[in-house]
Image: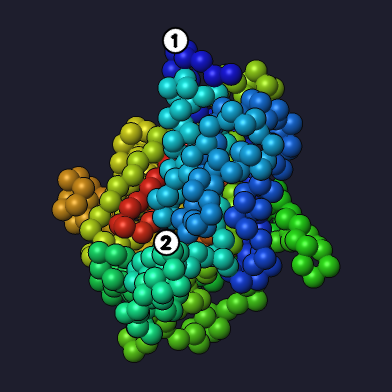
Amino acid sequence: MARAKSSQPRAAIVGGLRTPFMRAGTDFAQLDVLDLARAVTVELMQRFALDPAEVDHVIYGNVTRPVHYSNVARELVLAAGLPRATPAYTVTLACASACQAITDATNLIERGYADVVIAGGVEMLSNVPISLSPPLTRALLGASQAKSVGGKLASLRGLSLGDLPPVAPSIAETSTGLSMGQSAELMAKKNGIKREDQDGWALASHHKAAAAWDDGRLAEEVTPVYVANNGGRAVTRDNHVRRDTSLEKLSALKPVFDRNYGTVTAGNSSPLTDGAASVLLMSEDKAKSLGIEPKALVKSYAYTAVDPADELLIGPAYAIPKALDRAGLALTDIDVVEMHEAFAAQVLSTLQKLESKAFAQDELGRSEPVGRLDPDRMNLRGGSIALGHPFGATGARCVTTLTNEMARQAAQYGLVSVCAAGGVGAAIVLERV
């Protein structure tokens, strides 16, 4: 088990795995978050022949948490056959939840508090928790506590028809009332991001993903999930990738969030998705003692936040330079990039900011731009627009893909960035061992 050490360990990404990412309401609709998290985590341990007793901690991201799970990560420990003494906790940082899980794991390892950590995330947007309105909740609680029929009926008096419908979770910002899509529209307008450029980015995402499935690159990081409905079968591939899409098809789609003047469509946005992803982290010394070759080291990371009322999803433009500074690197040192594609408008806005001298001077206090990211080095196996975006799992998917692509290319440095609700931005720099 883990113990304090005199020299600081380094946190290594040993490997990662994810389920297929399925559009919400399709193949995984009859499953539960725990089903997906358990399936991918058990398979990950089996592929590395890892004794469950070696796992010191489990950290898992989840956003739209089912009401019957107060701590999904702890339930995962119990369901996946890990020792019951294994501590675990769940993190919620919107779309960057799995990034937070992975960097929390890094902290545990680098402090010498853990040698082996499983970090990741899961989301089931097919089965989001539905709540009751506050007046109906109070009335039902009062009725349940009343001791007579008359008392129960009295508790229900005063309810209106408007109090009765269930309340579904919203993707809108509490502070602004704007949805992510509406915020993406504002970013597109503010930064002059053209519709054709957004559609072009989306097209490339689908074509890269299709090519990565064809040549086996995505298959190496996806485990089948077995479902009992329809007679029982294995779900083996993502179901949102559109290999036959075209600029003509994408340009024919109507704007969703600003129907008159908008540019953000279902085609250049990430879809609501079900899926899970787990990453196995170890101290470098522990991996070597187990005969496992680490894929990459966590060199640095950074989290930032901006005013949600301005450019909600621009956080990575602030997080990326901070993470690079902490790593002692420049953007030109980065060989491969995984940037979460919440919306094509968000990605293109971020790239624009990184190249902007005015942004560097006014917002970052730098004399020169952060630099240019070559799209040919980004999201080489497709991004969230094509693959899907299970909120809690996306960060782990990005880290898994990046480490695999770095190994394939013998790349020295890689970068993950994820934007998140609340104006949060996350960035992680990896270094190949």
For disc 1, the neighbor class at 10 Å (few under 14, some 14 to 19, many from 20) is few
- Vertical relation: 307 (above or below) 184: above
Query: Which percent across, then down, holds residue 277?
Result: 59, 49
Give the numbered dot on residue 6: 1
Residue at image position (36%, 75%) is 154
Query: Which percent across, then down, holds residue 399?
Result: 53, 45
Query: Which percent across, then down, holds residue 405?
Result: 59, 45
- Badge 1 element: loop
The quarter of the picture where residue 273 lies is bottom right
Image quarter where the N terminus lies is top right
Asked whether the viewer can see residue 16, the reply is: no
Query: Which percent across, then down, holds residue 89?
Result: 49, 39
Asked whether the viewer can see residue 29, the reply is: yes
Q: Amino acid at mark 2?
A: Gln
Residue at image position (78%, 62%) is 228
The quarter of the picture where residue 127 lies is bottom right
